[in-house]
Image: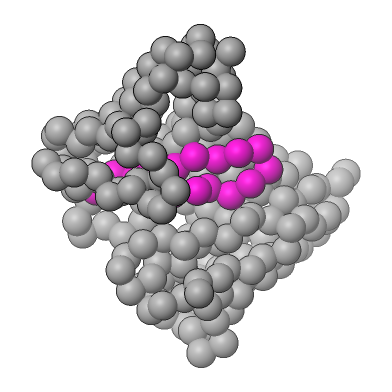
Amino acid sequence: GAVVSQHPSWVICKSGTSVKIECRSLDFQATTMFWYRQFPKQSLMLMATSNEGSKATYEQGVEKDKFLINHASLTLSTLTVTSAHPEDSSFYICSASSGGELKAFFGQGTRLTVV
Amino acid sequence: GQNIDQPTEMTATEGAIVQINCTYQTSGFNGLFWYQQHAGEAPTFLSYNVLDGLEEKGRFSSFLSRSKGYSYLLLKELQMKDSASYLCAVMDSNYQLIWGAGTKLIIKP
């Protein structure tokens, strides 16, 4: 089956620094990638949708200047959390789909802890 | 508004059968998905229904009734490793996934 690789799996960073999370589709071309955030015991919250080569579409309430998303190729999307604060600590998950495939394939997730 | 409802938590016994229900109200419908998520891990795909009826896949089956806005996930011969959260998600007319809050399933020996 399709594989989506997300890196790193976990990261601890100091408050005020930036963190980049990568999401790669390993064996298919991902025309669309989704970035989610998940707080403990809660469902996935969609942050943004990105299509290859175009600007990401952010959900209401998500700061686009804080959560920078780049989808430069059909196999790679990145999420950069800029000037991280402790309240940004969360589980971030990416998913990817190709044009003809409706179900989304998920990366392993990244647990971000900001201290 | 768009809404997905599923029970918050369910408990079942190892070896038994459990049914997790999901009701939805969305703007359009392009399919319903069930995902399994173990604590601290990303969701994994279980099933996809777009037509009414029952889809069986091993120990897991998923049912859909579009007229009733209703689906269920049926798990048979429960194993301890089935303890997880089960997420129901509906793809709306814009092909956006609308997620339920998830049902935490606890399996007891």
Which quarter of the rendered picture does the N terminus of chain A lie within? top left
Which quarter of the rendered picture does the C terminus of chain A lie within? top right
Q: Is residue A37 magenta?
A: yes
The residue stretch that appears in magenta: A32-46
Q: Position of residue B2 (x, y in %)?
A: 50, 72
As displayed, is residue A1 above or below residue B92?
above
Residue closest to the eye, A85 or A98: A85
Q: Position of residue B32 (x, y in %)?
A: 46, 68
Kindly give the residue lying farthest to the right in the view shown: B109
Whether residue A7 is visible here, answered yes or no, is no
Q: Is residue A27 magenta?
A: no
Q: Quadrant of residue A79?
A: top left
- Which residue is drawn at the image coordinates 37% and 23% (left, top)? A82
As displayed, is residue B53 above or below residue B92?
below
As displayed, is residue A15 above or below residue B24?
above
Residue closest to the eye, A48 or A33: A48
- Which residue is drawn at the image coordinates 58% and 60% (left, top)? B100
Q: Position of residue B83 (x, y in %)?
A: 72, 44
Residue closest to the eye, B78 or A67: A67
- Which residue is drawn at the image coordinates 39% and 25% (left, top)? A81
